[in-house]
Amino acid sequence: MLAYHLNQYRSVTGLSEWNWDLYQFIAMWPIAVSLFFLLSAATNSLSFWRSILRDMPIPKTKDVFISRFFRIAPAYYVALGVSFILSLIFNGYTDGGFLRLFAGYTFLSWTHPLSFFPVDINGPLWYISYDMMGAIFVMSTMSLLARVRKIFIPFILAVI
């Protein structure tokens, strides 16, 4: 991902054909983030699908969420805090900085354009917030689907 972000600052003036192709190839890497979201949702839902399709016990949604939270949140919180401090040092305080930081720490930065990037100097942190909310949505949905009669699953999915 470092190559992708550095690629955004490359000058495209006078690039040879192979270098232009490389530039375009790296510029498409955000697709990998989308694939990460899809794989993350699929792996989060597998134990629930086993419950639905194979009549296995329903996973404890709370345990699944806590496990995911502690797998992601500690490093995210450190990166968010350090980025915020560095942003204060290098850029000074910007309007809404603490509100954006709060939105980042609560994984709600994706909910509003002003808080979308929780800190000025580390934009990719929005991905983590978005992924965590996606995981909560998937786990909530799958928990509901695992608890209703199978006949209602298509209807619930259509409503969602």
Image: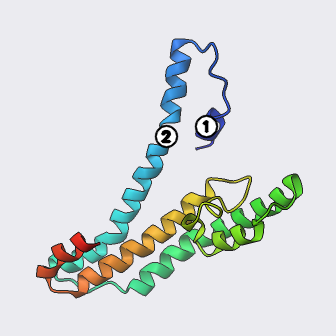
Characterize the local packing of mark 2: few (<14), some (14-19) or many (20 or more) Cα atoms within 10 angstroms. Answer: some
Residue 117 point in image, percent of width and height = 65, 58
Q: Give the camera-side residue of 95 and 88.
A: 95
Element assignment for label 1: helix
Residue 5 point in image, percent of width and height = 63, 40
Residue 68 point in image, percent of width and height = 49, 74
Measure the alpha-carbon separation of dots 2 and 1.
Answer: 9 Å
Left or right of 70? Residue 120 is right
Name the quadrant of the N terminus.
top right
Which of disc 1 and disc 2 is earlier in sequence?
Answer: 1
Element assignment for label 2: loop
Left or right of 137? Residue 113 is right
Residue at x 63% of width, y 12% of height: 14
- CB under 8 Å between discs 2 and 1: yes
Residue at x 16% of width, y 77% of height: 54
Q: Is residue 30 above or below residue 154?
A: above
Residue 16 got which mark?
A: none
Characterize the local packing of mark 1: few (<14), some (14-19) or many (20 or more) Cα atoms within 10 angstroms. Answer: few
Left or right of 22? Residue 84 is right
Colouring style: rainbow
Give, as a three-letter code, the residue at label 1: Ala
Residue at x 65% of width, y 62% of height: 114
Left or right of 19? Residue 90 is right
Q: Is residue 6 above or below residue 35?
A: above
Give, as a three-letter code, the residue at label 2: Trp
Q: Is residue 38 above or below residue 62?
A: above
To which residue does mark 2 refer? Answer: 29
To which residue does mark 1 refer? Answer: 3
Residue 99 point in image, percent of width and height = 72, 71
